Image (cartoon, helix red, strand yellow):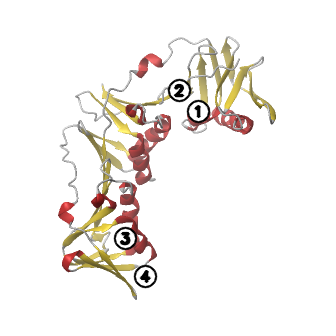
Amino acid sequence: MKFEIMRHRLLDALNDVMKAVSSKTTIPILTGIKLEVTEAGLRITGSDSDITIQTFIKAVEDGDQVIRVMEEGAIVLQARMFNEIVRKLPTSDVEIEVTEKYDTHIRSGKSEFHLIGLEPSEYPLLPDIQDDRHFEIPADLLKSIIRETVFAVSPSENRPVLTGVHWQAKNGELVCVATDSHRLARRKVTLEQLPEKEYSVVIPGKSLNELSKIIGDSSEPVQIVMTDQQVLFKTEDVLFYSRLLEGNYPDTSRLIPTEYKTFVTMNGKALFQAIDRASLLAREERNNIVRFSSLEENIVEISSSSPEIGEVEEEIQTTSIEGEQLKISFSAKYMMDALKAFDGQDVTIQFTGAMRPFILNSVKDNEVLQLIVPVRTY
């Protein structure tokens, strides 16, 4: 195997593929990445057995010769070392040559590295995914769905299914829900091309976070293919596979209240900033709790206190307050995470009482819903 490649294109591809490589894997060959070069271009694969990312660099892109292939072939190279070497090479061109016994030479300018490669046939094959359940979604919308839900997954492995986001497709609607049992985030999307067959999968939060980084600022459509054990996200030059989580996701629809006693409509950014300030004192306490009280003349008070440090109170003008007066306490972090999902929009907060879960919606639509369980302090 022998080829030359433009270093910046190789680095771009490695940046994506390295997101799937883990140093903690129990399968030694997965500490490596697989390179396969043909006349058409270079395919690079990385995996930790939960996530597999494969990217393809075309030999010719927009009329420019990116790769010059002298001899086709494949090799597995130690991922982190290869990535570091390519990052620090002195010139914009890289030559990679594999000789007998997978001895690999990496040349750039007057610099030459020798790496011991591994047998490429021992690298695990990609999961076999049939396109029986697939649809596509614009990349920017997919990124929004991830941003608005994934932060609410559980960090604890006690209930593994809660470390993922539940995706359910039915009746032309995709509903994505995450919960850690103290809060819940839900995003609904109407899509024209959803498969007729109803399905429900749980995608690990870690996978969705890595996928979001790879999508970047693209607005190209992303193809999504589901099976019972894997999901595949396909962009023009990247295949992103993730295993699905096993187990039944709880029926979260029962957690969302149907009747409310207090409605507050206000600017989400102003509320976020006030809670951020109040949390300066709340952070010193173990639970990071702030208090929210409705006052006369459409004003709410945000406050927190720490016995050792002091206290803070701040009044904010709202658009409207309807219903019963309210005093409620909640985690500053949970509320700030929820408000971030609305990106500074005006929000309506609907309360059922001081000790019952409350929900946040955008004033514009109900596509995004955030639910938070309060904390008893009063």
Residue beneath label 2, please? 182
Alpha-carbon span between mark 2 and mark 3: 43 Å
Q: Which mark is residue 334?
A: 1
How would you rate the neighbour count of disc 3 (Cα within 10 Å): few for under 14, some for 14-19, many for 20 or more? some
Among numbered discs 1 and 4, the one appearing first in the sequence:
4
Q: CA distance from mark 3 to mark 1?
A: 40 Å
What kind of element bears circle 2? loop
**346 to the left or right of 314:** left
Identified at 47% across, 18% down, the residue is 255
State the CA–CA distance, disc 1 to disc 2: 9 Å
Q: Nearer the viewer, mark 3 or mark 1?
A: 3
Q: Which residue position is annotated with label 4?
A: 91
Residue under numbered circle 3:
82
Q: Earlier in the sequence, mark 3 or mark 1?
A: 3
- The answer, for residue 80, to whether it is visible in the render is yes
User: Disc 1 residue type?
Assistant: Tyr
Q: Secondary structure at mark 4?
A: loop
Between 356 and 223, the one lying in front of the other is: 356
Find numbered disc 1 in the image and state the secondary structure of the residue it sits on.
Answer: helix
How many residues crowd mark 1 within 10 Å: few (<14), some (14–19), many (20+)? many
Residue 322 location (% of width, % of height): 66, 14
Q: Residue 35: percent from the left, percent from the top?
A: 26, 67
Spatial distance from mark 4 to mark 2, Cα to Cα?
52 Å
Q: Nearer the viewer, mark 1 or mark 2?
A: 2
Q: Give 32 or 42, whichever is nearer the viewer.
A: 32
Closer to the chain start, of discs 4 and 2, is 4
The answer to which of marks 1 and 2 sits earlier in the sequence is: 2
Q: Quarter of the image holding residue 250?
A: top left
Separation of residues labelled 3 and 4 (CA atoms):
16 Å
Q: Is residue 93 above or below residue 308?
A: below
Identify the residue at horizontal 22%, vertical 52% (top origin).
Answer: 126
